[in-house]
Amino acid sequence: MRYSVAPTAAKQIDLVKGNFNNGGQFQIILGTGIVDNVYAEFVQLAHASESTKEEVKLEAAQKMNPVQKLLKTLADVFVPILPALVASGLLMGINNILTAQGMFFPDKSLVEAYPQIADLAAMINMASNAGFTFLPVLIGFSTAQIFGGTPILGAVIGAIMIHPDLMSGYDYGQALLDNTVPYWNFFGLAVAKVGYQGTVLPVIVAVFFMSVIEKRLHKVMPAMIDNIVTPLLSVLITTALTFLFIGPVMRTVGDAMTSAVMWLFFDLGALGGLIYGITYPLLVITGMHHSLVTAETQILANIETLGGSPTFVVVACANCAQGAAALAVMFLAKHNAKMRSVASASGVSAWLGITEPAIFGVNLKLRFPFYAALIGGGIGAAYATMVQVLSVSQGPCGIIGVICIRPDCMLQFLVSVVIAIVCTFIITFVFAKTIGRKQLATL
């Protein structure tokens, strides 16, 4: 289907907030509450047949290169479980507020000042840890859905990998140093009896193989015994492959990913934050930013040893910078009521962590605000990395994300975000008078 004229024509419609190409699709941004009405009218006028969400995804995936497909797969695995991670993260933030020393009272936490809420804090702490403690189970369920396996069997594989009979994965490094790693003896082959707590990639790959094995067995197994033998063999074969090959290899790959992120932030310092802060909005344009959840989740799952994640504040700075650029356009577009409306709403949305309306509806359309946001967000991210702002959970990557930050870093988080906002706002006005004069004249 050709749509060479569609972008230009779409811009002339008042209800249209923006349009862009993403993952082989031409997408139009509409105002909240009207998209269903527009869709129903479009289907009727075009005499078009409806497709399911899965069918649309499959069609779009055909136009992606292998790297895009890999990143999309990682994103598809994590997007369904994000609500659980966000809920756990926000509960963890609440627990931090209740238990942080010196936040409200000198040398004392809220729980110590009000002992009657101690049990409530303990319950919140337990609830906040559950999502990360049983993360492999959630990932296993979601991965099986993506690759066509039985989701509950994927959850079983995830549960096997963190079974309490195994040595905790958190103790594996020290056990290696102490030479105390327990082993199974499989016909003379020593296999480490170690769990995969705090890991992400091992369970994804293990459940992928389980899904492949299960689908192959369904094709060859007689119907009479299929429901009994196929689950048995799928779980048994996958368990053996996981502890023999998949787990050790993917643990190494996952550790390398975590080490790369930590090197970027803690060895390169401000430069690493600047690079990440500038790169993140570029990934948002392609939709690949969801794949970054893989590394973020692995870091947070090892928070006891790593102390926190440095990536959350960088994303928050990048998001708030996009919002600041959009709000700057609101002031610049004095004679364009539609642009002022879109810029104000999308700017506030970006400050709350949702940047797509600001990026596609305002900043990319004019280009110079997007460039300003890249620079301003990078400056804020560089400062945050320099002072080592760390988060303890996932959550909304905007101003309100302060609840997800380590208590001793909360003030510096707000300073970093303000730097990103102020710098972007100023740079947007400067660019409007220099490289963006032609675009500004169109407002």
Image: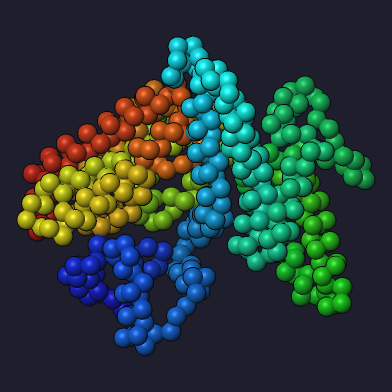
Name the residue rendered at 70%, 40% in the picture.
Answer: 196
Q: Is residue 340 visible?
A: yes
The quadrant where residue 374 appears: top left
Percent from the top left, x then y, of residue 217? Answer: 78, 69
**Relative height, residue 57 to residue 406 (above, below):** below
Q: In this view, does 351 lie to the left or right of 209?
A: left
Front residue (pair 201, 86)? 86
Name the residue rendered at 41%, 56% in the picture.
Answer: 287
Give the colouring mode of the picture. Answer: rainbow
Front residue (pair 395, 431)? 395
Name the residue rendered at 68%, 61% in the picture.
Answer: 151
Q: Can residue 29 be seen in this view?
A: no
Name, please, the residue furthest toward the top. 107
Percent from the top left, x then y, of residue 49? Answer: 43, 84
Q: Is residue 434 left or right of residue 360?
A: left
In the picture, the quarter occupied by the N terminus is bottom left
